[in-house]
Image (tube, rainbow, N blue to C red):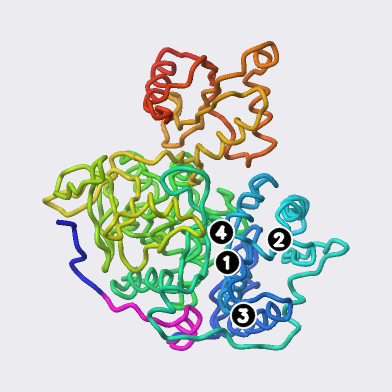
Amino acid sequence: MPFLAEKTFKIPNKDILSWIFDEQRHDVDKPIYIEAADPSQSISSRQAQSLIRKLIAGFRAHGVKPGDCVCIHSFNSIYYPILFLAIVGCGAVFAGTNPSYTPFELVHHFRTARVNFVITEPEMLAEVKNAAKETGIPSSEILIFDVQKQDVPSGFSSWSTLLTHGEEDWIRFDDEQLSKNTTAARLFSSGTTGLPKAAVLTHQTFVAQHTLSYEAEPPVMQIIRLCYLPMYHAAMVPLTHVSPLRAYFPTYIMRRFELEPFLSHVSRYHISELIVVPPVALAIIKTPSASKYSFENLKWVGCGAAPLALENQLALQKVLGPQTIVVQGWGMTETCCIAMRFVGHERDDTGSVGRPMYNLDLKLIDDEDQDITAYDTRGELCIRGPSIIPGYFDNPEANANSFTDDGYFKTGDIMYCSGSTKKWYIVDRKKELIKIRGFQVAPGEIEAVLLSHPQVLDAAVIGIRKPSEPDENEHPRAYVVRRPGPEGDAVNEELLKSYCSSRLAKFKEITGGIQFIDVMPRNPTGKILKRVLRDMAKTELSAGGPRI
């Protein structure tokens, strides 16, 4: 029998904006979104609602129709959540992309999410124009997000022109089927394998995520947050674009992460809750300057995106002080961020990711997809509930492979539940994703670039950890079969790394090295045996093998 939800909580059926704004119980004139670098720049709930209504009118005047997909390609800003809610409010669909992406990567994302309009900063316009041209997006559908007071390039219009068409109301509903079936966002995930896919997040997904996180089990303190992770990231979309306005969580926003300003802001603005990823946790642990700052108001820190070694969790606890609870949680794009966590004042020194939220059913399966659900038994975690995505956009094959017959999403994480404490633990990963500084990198994405080189016959990519590095960061390592002949023989590691770097974002560089082999190990059906490659890598690294 599955681990069925022991507790349930009613999920509202309203559209996101009505649910946020129609029942606000806080002072609507207090700042909610604040620029961390300049706190005089802020947006209150009243201002947010007016801006959103103006943007909705502007989007409609610009030709955005319900169901169209609008992509934001920029760094963080206090106006980013406002744009998100306006996109959703006019019936369109939000997509966000990494501002470091190359045109090659943007083409894939624009096509996969079926993007119709793009809002981007002028510094990123060249890459967006190249990708837009290849995907059929007219230049007239690219608006400039000049929030840093940059010059607007000739031939393009500022996003602020959207604010000049009066105000219009958002699309409203209070209906369970509409809430379940109306898409609000297409967020990118690699799922368990393959190239990045567009996960469909509906109005219900977002409403359920917040309701189960903060209303079924209310926080025991006033939440004041610092947003420093990128706002397109699956963890940040619900946490920064939805929850602050619903529950009055003042949120200070950094344009991008820098360690010293980050530490200063946590101290200066009395940040009470932080979400961190392992690389940030390790940076805090390792920097001597952490001792210069006060963390007395920081009451709760949750680490996610990738497992944090227990010794590092305890080290972070020591740096921040006894007043701060440091715990881990678990979630993914497909669960609308968090799905397991610790609540209230509970502490943990075992490395657990906590317990599931209300309304979520869990089960464990073996390699044959057979139910093996039992305490203290390892298996692939499967999950279902109102905050779980209904599927991937326009990808029936991925949907067929990602869900069980009884509606559970197969996470690819190998976990178990302690029979004595009911805490959950991650022990392995079935899926192939490589975790790099909190980002997910699909091996297939790098493999596709390698295979596009005319002298590469076969390629496979795995994630490795370098023995010289004590952290949890992984590095992509490629195994390549060259075409026979002098031209193939001339292809070396440096050439292939350069080839990939020109087509992929910097964090996807093949920092684990490239190993040339004669034959790719495959099973009788042709599937690459990555287990064999991982064993090869362990042997090579332990022997001091190929340079990485």
The residue located at (70%, 47%) in the rendering is 103
Residue at point 57%, 66% (across, down): 94
* 523 versus 52 height, above or below: above
- The span picked out in magenta is 9-25
Residue topped by disc 1 = 94
The residue nearer to you, when weighing 75 against 193, is: 193
For the point 63% across and 70% down, the residue is 79
How far apart, in angstroms, are the residues tagged by discs 3 and 4?
A: 18 Å
Sequence-wise first label, 3 or 4: 3
Q: Secondary structure at mark 2?
A: strand
Can residue 228 be seen from the camera position used here? yes
**SS majority, magenta:** loop
Of label 4 and label 2, which has the lower sequence position?
2
Q: CA distance from mark 3 to mark 2?
A: 18 Å
Q: Which residue in the structure is indicated by mark 2? A: 120
Circle 3: element type:
helix
- Residue located beneath label 3 in the image: 52
User: Earlier along the polypeptide chain: callout 1 or callout 3?
Assistant: 3
